[in-house]
Image: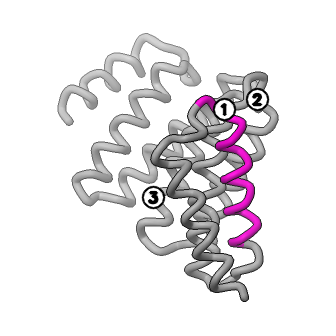
Amino acid sequence: MSYYEKTLKIYTQILPVNHPWLATTYKNIGLARISMKERMTGLNNLCKAMEIRKAAFPSNHPSIASICGIIGGVYREVGDYTTALKFYEEALDIGKRSSHIDYTRLAMTYYKMSRILSELKVYEKAVKHAELAVESVKKSSTPNSPDAIEFKKNLEQLQGKKS
């Protein structure tokens, strides 16, 4: 942790406030804090990384989608499903507008959203997101991966709950 903090101190002295290296450092500190069970401090660092990325990159940049997905995951872990869905939705929106669509990442985001919607007992929407996860992974370079199998299994389970 101390190396990240030293890096941040140096970077804040020599780099512009919206430099991508600062965003990466804030992200790394945030992830380290979260792994140390300091979720709120970690979230603050991740949000700072997101702000910098939004200022440094075009609005459809995959780095912004990535940090939104990470933040969504933290909110999912603490049970704040509404906020998690908001960040996952933003990640999807950015991912769909990206110049190079990462179907594997889109599929994973749809899958995570389907799991949250299932927890909230919004089964119709959960099924739709699970279907989109399966459709997206078919377009990816890993249509037969373990994740793809999990996405299909999730869809089948949700279809059983919906009926």
7 on left or right of 125: left
User: On the image, numbered disc 3 is attached to which residue?
Assistant: 74
Quarter of the C terminus within the rendering: bottom right
Q: Check whether the beta carbons of the residues at disc 1 and disc 3 lie within 8 A of each other.
A: no
| Percent of width and height locating residue 28 | 36, 35
Q: Which mark is residue 102?
A: 1
The local crowd at label 2, few if under 14, some if 14 to 19, many if 20 or more residues have their Cα within 10 Å, is some
Residue at 56% over, 69% down: 115
Question: For this rendering, which residue is in front, 84 or 6?
Answer: 84
Q: Read off the magenta span.
A: 126-141
User: On the image, numbered disc 2 is attached to which residue?
Assistant: 98
Q: Amino acid at mark 1?
A: Asp
Note whether 145 is above or below 74 in the view shown. above
Question: For this rendering, which residue is in front, 95 or 162?
Answer: 162
Q: Check whether the beta carbons of the residues at disc 2 and disc 1 lie within 8 A of each other.
A: yes
Marks 2 and 1, how far apart in space?
8 Å
- Based on the picture, tell me whether residue 137 belongs to the magenta stretch: yes
Sequence-first tag of 1 and 3: 3
Question: For this rendering, which residue is in front, 156 or 71?
Answer: 156
Marks 2 and 3, how far apart in space?
23 Å
Note whether 26 is above or below 127 in the view shown. above
The mark lying in front, picked from 2 and 1, is 1
Q: Which mark is residue 77?
A: none
Residue at disc 2, secondary structure? loop
- Based on the picture, tell me whether residue 163 belongs to the magenta stretch: no
Q: Amino acid at mark 3?
A: Val
The local crowd at label 1, few if under 14, some if 14 to 19, many if 20 or more residues have their Cα within 10 Å, is some
Q: Amino acid at mark 2?
A: Ser
Residue at 67% over, 37% down: 103
